[in-house]
Image (spheres, helix red, strand yellow):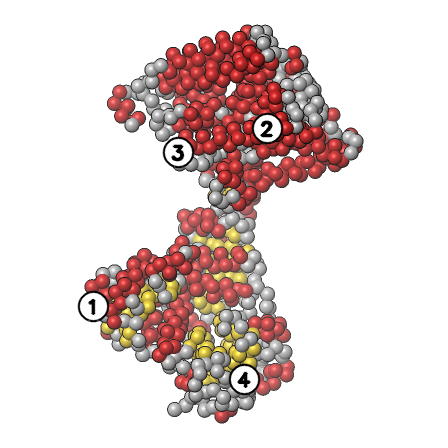
Amino acid sequence: MKIVILGCGKVGKTILEQLVVEGHDLSVIDRQEDLIKRIGKTYDVNVHYGDGASRKVQIEAGVDSADMFIAVTDSDELNLLCCMIAKKTANCKTIARVRNPIYNDEIMFLKEEIGLSMVINPEYAAAKEIARILRFPSAIKIDTFSKGKVEMLEFKIIPGSPLCDLCLSDMSKKIKGQVLVCTVQRGNNVFIPNGNFILKEKDLISIVASHENSKQFFKNIGLNTHQVKDVMIVGGGRIAHYLSKDLLSAGIKIIVIEKDEKRQKELEKLLGDTGRFNVLQGDATNQEVLIEEGIDYCSAFVSLTGIDEANIFLSLFAKSRTDAKVITKINRISFDDIVENFDLGSIIYPKFITAEYIVSYVRALQNGMGSNVETMYRILNQKAEALEFKIQPGSPVIGIPLEKLDTKDNVLIACIIRGIDVIFPNGSSVILEKDYVIVVTTLLSGFKDIKDIIKG
Amino acid sequence: MNFPMIMYILGMVLKYEGIFMLIPFITGLIYKENAGFSFAVVGLTSYVSGYLLTRKKPQNQLYFAREGFACVALSWIVMSIVGAMPFVLNKDIPNFIDALFETTSGFTTTGASILSDIEALNKSSIMWRSFTHWIGGMGVFVFILAVLPMAGGYSMYLMSAESPGPTVGKLLPRLRDTAKILYMIYFVMTLLQIIILLIFKMPFFDALTITFGTAGTGGFGIKNDSMAGYSIPIQTTVTIFMILFGVNFNAYYLLLGKNKGDAFKMEEVRWYFLIIFLSIAIITLNIVKQYSGPVEALRHCAFQVGSIITTTGYSTVDFNLWPQLSRTILVMLMFIGACAGSTGGGIKVSRIIMLFKMVGVEMTKIIYPRSAKFVRMDKNVVDDDTVKTVAAYLITYVLIFGVSMFILAFDNLDMVTNFTGIAATLNNIGPGLELVGPSGNFSVFTPVSKLVLIFDMLAGRLELFPLLLLFSPSIWVFKHYKKKNYALKK
């Protein structure tokens, strides 16, 4: 597909990286000359220097023949304007990043009137993901498939857990709750385990299950399945705003610590009409502030300041003092491997969430062109991928028992959703037309269709 | 201070008061009373002097907050003095201070009386007493603003000095339209009550005067036993209308508009009805033994609670004889008062809500010193200035109350009489407890005390500050604007 990306900030760059790997023709526009030059040298894309709101620049960049236009500059209004121009110029699909909470509430109207195909709001998406984790604090990451029918949960095996030293083939006998272990990360290696695999403590595993079963499973291995009661959030930015709004509606008590007094008052005005919300003015990098405001008693701690380093230290501090669920937001740090070695609880990368959204949208768009990816998630710190395919008539996998299906290595068919039934397949299961199939793989080669999992 | 302009506005008030006096005059003609002519004389004098004052518009028509406030305070004083004249002339109330007390009590919609035998008065005097309630209820300036196009955009100061409540909301972009809408609602509700009372076979004269007293939440009865002598349907109608006139008029405006549901979501109105409901429930249980059955107890209780919380002051029974708990609740209701933006007096439900919320905010600030909680009404943040004004209002209120208590103490009456006497006048209710209870009256006080109570009534009606401003020396600076500043007025 021909795609034009406007804006090369951290989100733009992440999207670009992903889409290049997937083999699309990209051209990139940005107003910063040195930045755009560097991009041109690092990636195999076309670069154009100029103002994206100019029709001339857009046409130079090839918008008139493009299939898709993605505007991710840091200004909402500019993004919306550029998408409108691109839409009128080429009638391509348009995606805009809109972050202002005011627009977010009216997004349906904007989408319709400006003709946007999709609106991305990294902060909103990150807040949603954090909220999901806080409702089920034992998991590090939760993704849902088929409108929530199936969940994929990621969690770490803690010492003393009944899962320690357990062989996977014995699992269903020893622990009730039908779940399937899809992937295991031990150290820096990611496996797709077979029946003989033995789990060890500190393994990061991801499981697939229906919502009820996953709850049951967590209960049986002695982990908490209740949503957290109160949350301490450090940093009162947009994510904190969206997150608080979400959590307040779930009845969770919130304390936000914000450095800037003006922003504190603003947040208080926006959200303070319930007694459960309290925003405090203070510098959270000062330990005493955190201790005074009750870091030792909160059941969850979320660090959302604008500085990644501060977030890491805050979370480490929280971990050192309490057993609370800790969530760390990391925006730009590229030392993923090192960050992983710290005990930071759940890590949220807003830029990856955005990229995930866009990549899965791009793949879904290729439906007509042979692809049928419904949803896609990156799991285990971007080291594996979980995809949901819709089975189209005439697909080569239909009707063949799975044991006879010659799939590639490191590919697992985790789950088949047939109507309202959720099937965990064994060797004799077959895939039928109109099924939804969840595939987990450590090959990050960009599967576009279910037939890509077959060898050859 | 722009005195020519103040004199001009005062002249306008006098003119209208002259016109208003036509009503008791006509009443006098109908009942063939000589007393009616005293209204004609005073009314004509008032109109002519008003006409002379307003003959020439002052060159400088600028007026700001201080002119507005001073003007309103002065007008109410002048209005009361002029309104008291006919009573002195027709010998119904020969003592001037008593007549002034009675008229001020009328205009401020208090309903406190120094008369022991009301039925002995001329019909025209009774009509004037009650009609002053109706004028005072919505306010003279609101009326003037509704009928006259006022020059300049500063008329808001006049309205905010006269309207009850912590904030004055304009319902429509133009002040004149807002004033018109308010008078429209007031007028229609008044008419409705008159019609319903007539249906229940109340004499026309009684229906008019009682309705004026209800609409303005005044409470001058026309019988010595206030409302006790009327039939049950009439009493019930009055109960309902008293409570309705105590509701914030903005709620009625919302009912007329598109979003009718918003009227029921107003926090103040909800609390108002909740307070009424709880008070009725507790008092009914408390007094049920004194009456022949729970229904009768409920009926009397609802009437008294409605009368006191809306600061009307009618009564069907002598609640001075009720048990201590019921009396205490009634005294508390006296202080709470009606909704802001109604015709009622008292501290106002919205201020009470805000005060409680301020306590909550202070407590949060002790638990979390770094927090920034705001006082909220109807989910919106109340700005700091309004909150401060509410606090200042309460402090001023307590100060005025304290000073009044001190001066009244010279009369050597009992504490409950003094305390409830001041509460009844400062909150514009009318009857208090003990000597000033429903069966007593205010003639027990000395003239000095009466003057203090007159001040309290005016202070209560005008929300304290306009009247206090008159004591500020800086308001009496005679300084004329220079010619070149006149350009501002356009």
Q: From where the camera sits, is residue B238 visible?
A: no
Q: Mark 4 points at which residue?
A: A425
For the residues labelled 4 and 1, the Cα–Cα distance comes to: 51 Å
- The C terminus of chain A appears in which quarter of the rendering? bottom left
For the residues labelled 3 and 2, the Cα–Cα distance comes to: 32 Å
Q: Name the residue under label 2.
A: B195
For the residues labelled 1 and 2, the Cα–Cα distance comes to: 79 Å
Task: Give the residue type that dot 4 points to.
Answer: Pro
Q: In this view, does B295 lie to the left or right of A8?
A: right
Of tags 4 and 3, which is closer to the observer?
A: 3
Disc 1 crowd, CA 10 A, few/some/many (<14, 14-19, 20+): few
Of tags 4 and 2, which is closer to the observer?
A: 2
Q: From where the camera sits, is residue A15 visible?
A: yes
- Which chain does the residue under circle 2 lie in? B
Question: Would you identify the image quadrant in which residue B215 lies?
Answer: top right
User: Residue B174's mark?
Assistant: 3
Question: Would you identify the image quadrant in which residue B287 lies?
Answer: top right
Percent position of residue A83, x then y? 30, 62
Residues marked 4 and 1 touching at CB (< 8 Å): no
Instruction: Write the residue at 74% across / 29% down.
Output: B323
Of tags 1 and 2, which is closer to the observer?
A: 2
Q: Is mark 3 on a helix, strand or loop?
A: loop
Using the rendered image, report if marks 1 and 2 lie on a common chain. Answer: no
